[in-house]
Image (tube, rainbow, N blue to C red):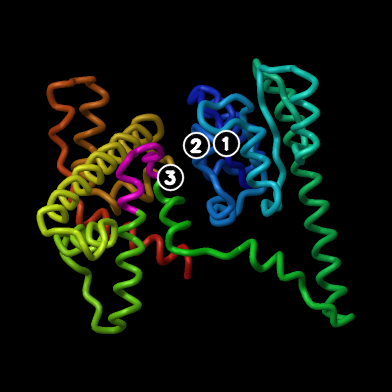
């Protein structure tokens, strides 16, 4: 099973991840600290089966998040909260939550509940498989809703990668998504003669699109510089995140996949040493190849949607 965790407490997210892996219940394919950072496109791209969601979050709480996702999400919601108000529990169940678990977390309780959720999902998948097999004999077409739930695009793939790289919440994320959109449009427009543009062309393109045709050259130059700074800060946060994963577990799948593709591994290793030594004087010495990062992100996003 694929799990996605939405909780503003990093300790809770880490605890749930460890428990799911220790109990061999499935894989945690993503995590964010607020419900506002999740949409159905991301859940579909990650092929999420179960969403573990906190009730109280700073921007969009668990109730509002389930309400926003429930119409299209085909998996199960499990709500986790320290609030035990009957009204909120009732509302959570009415919106489609499978279970409501109260904090503090109890390892045995959560493991037992998630095993039940997994069994229910497997049962439903089995029934669906039987129904699809029957449809082949009866000639009934498949539901169009099932196929639409797997729709992917470059922006959804970008959000997925941003989540994996630990850049959620950075202002440069929107710039990166605009860059992906710009590159995709250019590739479609130019076809086979397409060559990856320079950073200057990329930032000029998204700045012109943002400001409109009436923008003056000075305004475009100012926006280009601001956009580049936002992206650079986001990339530095991604480097810290990947280096942190490596310090915790050198065999972490995300660390293995991203440390030498999005970055030069020597820079990741340097950042790991900085974090390990907690030396603030050297914390900004790592250099990030922005063009390599953007080019890799574009290629990875295209692979996800193809």
Q: Where is mark 1, residue-wise?
A: 5
Q: Looking at the image, which residue is at 13% across and 22% down?
A: 281
Q: Earlier in the sequence, mark 3 or mark 2?
A: 2
Tell me, for residue 32, which label it has, or none. Answer: 2
Decide: few, some or many residues near mark 3? Use Cα within 10 Å; few <14, some 14-19, many ≥20: many
Q: Could you say which is closer to the camera, residue 37 or residue 205?
A: 205
Q: Could you say which is closer to the camera, residue 83 or residue 139?
A: 83
SS of the residue under disc 1: strand
Q: Would you place residue 206 above or below residue 33 in this image? A: below
Q: Position of residue 144 (x, y in %)?
A: 72, 70
Decide: few, some or many residues near mark 2? Use Cα within 10 Å; few <14, some 14-19, many ≥20: many
Q: Looking at the image, which residue is at 35% across and 77% down?
A: 188
Q: CA distance from mark 3 to mark 1?
A: 12 Å
- Tags 2 and 1 touching, CB below 8 Å: yes
Q: Would you place residue 132 above or below residue 206 in this image? A: below
Q: Where is mark 3, residue-wise?
A: 164
Q: CA distance from mark 2 to mark 1?
A: 7 Å
Q: Position of residue 250 (x, y in %)?
A: 37, 37
SS of the residue under disc 3: helix
Residue 218 appears left or right of 268: left
Q: Earlier in the sequence, mark 2 or mark 1?
A: 1
SS of the residue under disc 2: strand
Tell me, for residue 74, which label it has, or none. Answer: none
Residue 48 appears left or right of 256: right
Query: Dividing the picture into quarters, in which one does residue 205 lie?
Result: bottom left
**Start-end of magenta stretch:** 164-176
Q: Does the segment drawn in magenta span residue 173? A: yes
Residue 145 appears left or right of 37: right
Of the residues tagged 3 and 2, which is closer to the observer? 2
Q: Earlier in the sequence, mark 3 or mark 1?
A: 1
Q: Position of residue 45 (x, y in %)?
A: 54, 56
Q: Could you say which is closer to the camera, residue 115 or residue 180?
A: 180
């Amino acid at each position: 099973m694929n799990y996605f965790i939405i909780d503003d407490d990093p300790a809770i997210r880490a605890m749930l991840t460890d428990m799911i892996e220790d109990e061999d219940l499935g894989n945690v394919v993503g995590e964010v600290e607020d419900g506002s950072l999740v949409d159905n496109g991301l859940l579909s791209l990650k092929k999420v089966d179960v969403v573990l969601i906190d009730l109280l979050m700073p921007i969009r709480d668990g109730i509002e998040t389930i309400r926003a996702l429930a119409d299209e999400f085909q998996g199960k919601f499990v709500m986790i909260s320290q609030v035990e108000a009957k009204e909120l529990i009732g509302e959570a169940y009415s919106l489609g939550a499978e279970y409501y678990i109260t904090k503090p977390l109890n390892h045995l309780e959560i493991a037992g509940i998630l095993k039940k959720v997994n069994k229910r999902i497997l049962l439903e998948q089995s029934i669906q498989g039987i129904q699809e097999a029957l449809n082949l004999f009866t000639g009934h077409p498949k539901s169009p809703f099932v196929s639409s739930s797997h729709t992917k695009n470059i922006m959804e793939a970008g959000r997925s990668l941003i989540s994996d790289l630990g850049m959620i919440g950075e202002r440069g994320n929107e710039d990166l998504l605009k860059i992906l959109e710009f590159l995709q449009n250019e590739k479609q427009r130019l076809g086979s003669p397409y060559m990856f543009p320079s950073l200057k062309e990329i930032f000029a393109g998204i700045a012109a699109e943002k400001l409109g045709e009436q923008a003056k050259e000075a305004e475009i130059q100012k926006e280009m510089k601001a956009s580049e700074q936002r992206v650079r800060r986001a990339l530095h946060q991604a480097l810290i995140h990947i280096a942190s994963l490596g310090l915790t577990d050198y065999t972490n799948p995300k660390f293995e996949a991203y440390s030498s593709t999005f970055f030069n591994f020597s820079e990741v290793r340097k950042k790991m040493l900085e974090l390990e030594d907690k030396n603030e004087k050297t914390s900004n010495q790592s250099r990030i190849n922005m063009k390599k990062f953007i080019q890799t992100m574009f290629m990875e996003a295209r692979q996800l949607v193809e």
